[in-house]
Amino acid sequence: MSTWKINLKFADGTGNEIELYDAKSYFNGYLKLKRSYFNRLVKAIKITKKYTTGHAIEKVVGPDSKEWTLNPWMLLLIKDNEKKKPFWLFIKREKDLSGLLIAIGPKQFAEYNNSNTLENKRDIKRLINYIVAYLNKFNCSVLLPNYLS
């Protein structure tokens, strides 16, 4: 599995590096998310305290070892409140305001979804939709690049 390395630097000065796994292999290309999905995500952020936004993406290095920092990235850090399991979605916004799912994490989530492609493809798509439909089920932090602040 190819990895993306994301350096996070928060407003309080703390930082972290996380590794996400390229999503191209799951979908034979990158999964496209419609503009309406992001509209629903913004609405969810406005109506629940469990969803937050912030700036923390400091540096992005792709599987090709090139720096990809200066792109319109979104990192969704999600925790399922029932199963107590985290999962991460790394998304690049496009000019038409749609988005592409570029990578997923953490490693356990990526490995689980790598085992059975067709069913897991549906599971990932379902999870992405559940995030904006079942707001009480998740805690979600949406992180944006620091260069945008």
Image (cartoon, helix red, strand yellow):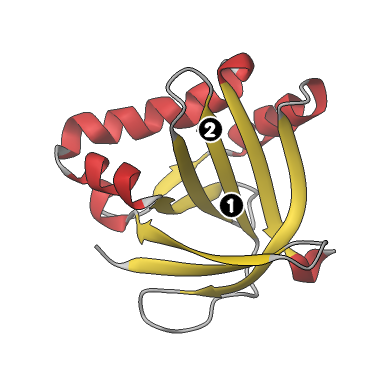
Could you tell me residue 125's position as x and y percent? Answer: 39, 31
For residue 89, side relative to residue 146 (left or right): left
Could you tell me residue 91's position as x and y percent? Answer: 53, 52
- Camera-nearest residue between 147 and 82: 82
Q: Secondary structure at mark 1?
A: strand
> Residue at position x 40%, y 50% from top?
106
For residue 14, side relative to residue 92 (left or right): right
Q: Amino acid at mark 2?
A: Lys
- Camera-nearest residue between 112 and 31: 112
> Residue at position x 46%, y 84% from top?
66
For residue 132, side relative to residue 30 (left or right): right
For residue 50, side relative to residue 126 (left or right): right
Q: Quadrant of residue 133?
A: top right
Quadrant position of the N terminus in the picture: bottom left
Q: Is residue 1 above or below residue 88?
A: below
Q: Secondary structure at mark 2?
A: strand
> Residue at position x 78%, y 68% from top?
13
Could you tell me residue 111's position as x and y percent? Answer: 24, 47
Query: What whole-number distance in Å separates the C-alpha atoms at marks 2 and 1?
Result: 13 Å
Q: Residues within 10 Å of mark 2 (few under 14, many from 20)?
A: some
Quadrant position of the C terminus in the picture: bottom right
Label annotation for residue 75: 1
Q: Quadrant of residue 44?
A: top right
Residue at mark 2: 79
